[in-house]
Amino acid sequence: MHWWRVAPWGVLSSLCLIFLRPEPSLYWVESWHYAPLRDPVRAMVVDWVTSPTGQWAMLSERWLRSTIGLSNESMPTGRAGPAVPDESSSTSPPGVLFPQAADSTSNLSTLGAYRKGQKTCFDQPKKVLLVGDSMMQGLGPWLQRQFKSSGAQVLDYSKHSTGLVNKAYYNWPEKLNMLMEQHQPDMVMVMLGTNDHLDMVMDGKQYVRYRSEAWHERYSERVQQMAMAALNRGAPVVWIGLPAMREAWYEDAAKVTAPIFEREMQALGMPFIDARPVLLEPSETYSHYLSQGERKVLARAGDGIHLAPYGNQVLVKAIFERLRFCPIPLP
């Protein structure tokens, strides 16, 4: 084989390693609305990224970018480089993630919610704000139906393909802060994490490796930002964890994010509802169907990620069994 036939492919491969990074490719695919086209392409990208060849290519690409000065990260290893200050650290004093709402932190003691060591109740909300990714988009109508019986208004601002990792695509802490000012809800319910199985891009160029210690720290900070955006304005936060996923890529994200959500909510005295045990059959790691008496009922969508109508009903029931609302006093 002549070298001039091989050389162009070698140059093209090098350029792909430098510029066609898998993380932006996944973000791009996730943003597609047409599922019949999106899902097979996403599966192909995920299969390549998680394969030994894909892992080697990602390491090579990061080393090459660092060597020629296209990235300010160090040679990639199993851990991320030095911690990178998050966006809030340079503008907010310690302990205050949203300075403009710092004067309302006294509301935290009057939430009437699950404070540490106390088994109290939530005040009946009149306005509930739903935020999250496509998992919340599916769950939202069922939550709205449940809250309707108490006369509560439900505002659903969930958005597909979003998460806490890629702020350049959608900045959830900033968005939630704006929604709190605009609508002033009495309660916020969050369901995120499905799309957060990626490296965290910082300042548009430096990123923190997924699953690294620094990644966990930055992700925890963003969960705190979400919670404090609501708590600083007197609204309790109900965080809903992800169910088990059929695809390994999404299952890993569910397992990695759940302990972070639970830890941060416990620290704030807010409830964390884990969807995993609710939507699993005993001794199974993923359940497409759930038992209902002697028959099996479809609980998950065909993609192995989202919930079917029955799965949404089961999860909403579990959420409201966990939440305790204070009795409405008689007039």
Image: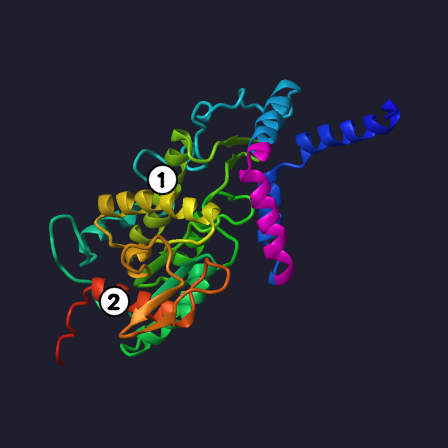
The residue at 45%/61% (across/down) is 306
Rendered image: mark on residue 317: none
Quadrant of res 38: bottom right
Disc number lying in front (2 or 1): 2
Q: Amino acid at mark 2?
A: Phe
Q: Secondary structure at mark 1?
A: helix
> Could you say where residue 120 lies in the image, as x and y percent from the top left?
13, 59
Horizontal side of 111 relative to 280 (left or right) equals: left
The quadrant of the image that shows the N terminus is top right
Magenta span of residues: 36-54
Rendered image: mark on residue 220: 1
First in sequence, mark 2 or 1: give its number. Answer: 1
Magenta segment's dominant SS is helix
Residue situated in front as seen by the camera: 225 or 261: 261
> Could you say where residue 24 lies in the image, as x and y percent from the top left?
60, 42
The residue at 66%/20% (across/down) is 68
> Could you say where residue 230 lies in the image, as x and y percent from the top left?
33, 53
Residue 18 visible at all: yes
The quadrant of the image that shows the C terminus is bottom left
Please name the residue that numbered disc 2 is placed on. 320
Q: CA distance from mark 2 to mark 1?
A: 26 Å
Dots 2 and 1: beta carbons under 8 Å?
Answer: no
